């Protein structure tokens, strides 16, 4: 049998659904440019194909790995399952963050990746972990628009900025939330449910928030709790004798609303303000916090109570 005829029979067998030989390379399957795998099954008539084992594929500067895949070469719909790893050579913008935050290559891992190659859309589902430059995010799901390179996170979102640039959503270093709704063009965003965020040593929790990631102005409402590392109150501080075993409670402020000016690093607490620190309990109508001067200024019906300290003589 001639070499040309043997090759033709192998190709025909592959298209009829026979397992491919080891380390075969295929083009156009599921809109991929290349596929490297030990086995591939396909149907020439329907376009359906299956990759039953670990594989690597590339498409438009994107490299994808997974334990197995199935899809259709004609519709370019693909589902990849198991230890999915996606490397992007181009920067991606997380929806809700300013465009300047998208820098450098990135990596996304998940349990399942659904690809709509015809519309350049990717859906990452389950244990989603995305890293890019100094940013690390986790979520239940991520949807990527390949045409705009914008990545939208949803479900138990956690965003962590390790570079200290405050370039994330609302200028926060970290955010933990169930959902973040945002406009990638204007920078406006909404966190509709209870969330926790940190910035410059402040941990902030609230029922909901609205703001703009470009101007870094944020308004947080509903059961707002702010834990401060070290922000002294106006006036002399008490000199408590701490308990030898107890851990001092960090200064904590609660209020109805917190307005943040992230550019000037100023916070305005409004309504039912309650500030507590070791040895002191204060209520007021309003409080203004300056990160620059590590200063807390209380206004309106200010009432100060010196509290008894454990272990004091």
Image (cartoon, rainbow, N blue to C red):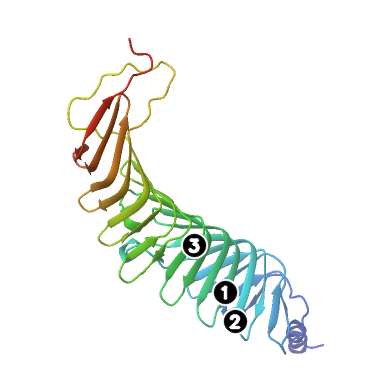
Residue 308, above or below 259: above
> Is residue 167 at all visible to an observer of this figure?
no
SS of the residue under disc 1: strand
Q: Report the residue marked by disc 3.
A: 154
- The quadrant of the image that shows the C terminus is top left
- Mark earlier in primary sequence (2, 1): 2
- Identify the disc placed on residue 184: none
Q: Is residue 136 left or right of residue 78?
A: left
Between marks 3 and 2 in the image, the one whose residue lies nearer the viewer: 3
Q: Residue at x 38, y 17 (%)?
A: 310
Q: Residue visible at 34% across and 53% down?
A: 221
Q: Are marks 2 and 1 in contact (CB under 8 Å)?
A: yes
Q: Callout 2 environment at 10 Å: few (<14), some (14 to 19), or many (20+)?
A: many
Q: CA distance from mark 3 to mark 1?
A: 17 Å
Q: Nearer the viewer, residue 102 or 17?
A: 102
Number of the label disc, if any, that sits on residue 115: 1
Contact, CB < 8 Å: mark 3 with mark 2?
Answer: no
x 55%, y 66%: residue: 124
């Amino acid at each position: 049998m001639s070499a040309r005829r043997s090759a033709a029979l192998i190709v025909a067998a592959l298209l009829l659904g026979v397992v491919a030989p080891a380390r075969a390379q295929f083009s156009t399957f599921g809109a991929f440019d290349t596929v490297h795998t030990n086995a591939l099954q396909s149907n020439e008539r329907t376009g359906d194909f299956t990759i039953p084992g670990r594989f690597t594929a590339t498409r438009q500067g994107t490299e994808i790995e997974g334990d197995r895949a199935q899809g259709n070469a004609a519709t370019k719909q693909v589902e990849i399952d198991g230890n999915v790893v996606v490397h992007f050579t181009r920067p991606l913008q997380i929806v809700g963050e300013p465009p300047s935050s998208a820098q450098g290559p990135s990596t996304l891992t998940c349990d399942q990746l659904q690809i709509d190659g015809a519309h350049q859309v990717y859906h990452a589902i389950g244990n989603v972990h995305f890293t890019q430059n100094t940013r690390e995010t986790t979520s239940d799901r991520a949807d990527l628009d390949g045409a705009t390179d914008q990545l939208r996170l949803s479900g138990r979102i956690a965003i962590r900025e390790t570079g200290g640039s405050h370039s994330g959503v609302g200028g926060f270093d970290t955010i933990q939330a169930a959902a973040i709704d945002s406009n990638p063009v204007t920078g406006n965003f909404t966190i509709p449910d209870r969330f926790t965020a940190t910035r410059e040593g402040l941990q902030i929790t609230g029922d909901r928030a609205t703001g703009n990631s470009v101007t870094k102005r944020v308004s947080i409402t509903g059961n707002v709790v702010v834990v401060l590392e070290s922000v002294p109150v106006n006036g002399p501080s008490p000199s408590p004798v701490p308990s030898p075993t107890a851990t001092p409670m960090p200064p904590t402020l609660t209020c109805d609303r917190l307005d943040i000016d992230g550019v000037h690093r100023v916070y305005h607490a409004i309504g039912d303000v309650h500030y507590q620190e070791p040895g002191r309990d204060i209520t007021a109508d309003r409080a203004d916090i300056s990160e620059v001067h590590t200063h807390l200024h209380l206004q309106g019906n200010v009432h100060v109570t010196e509290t008894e300290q454990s272990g004091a003589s």
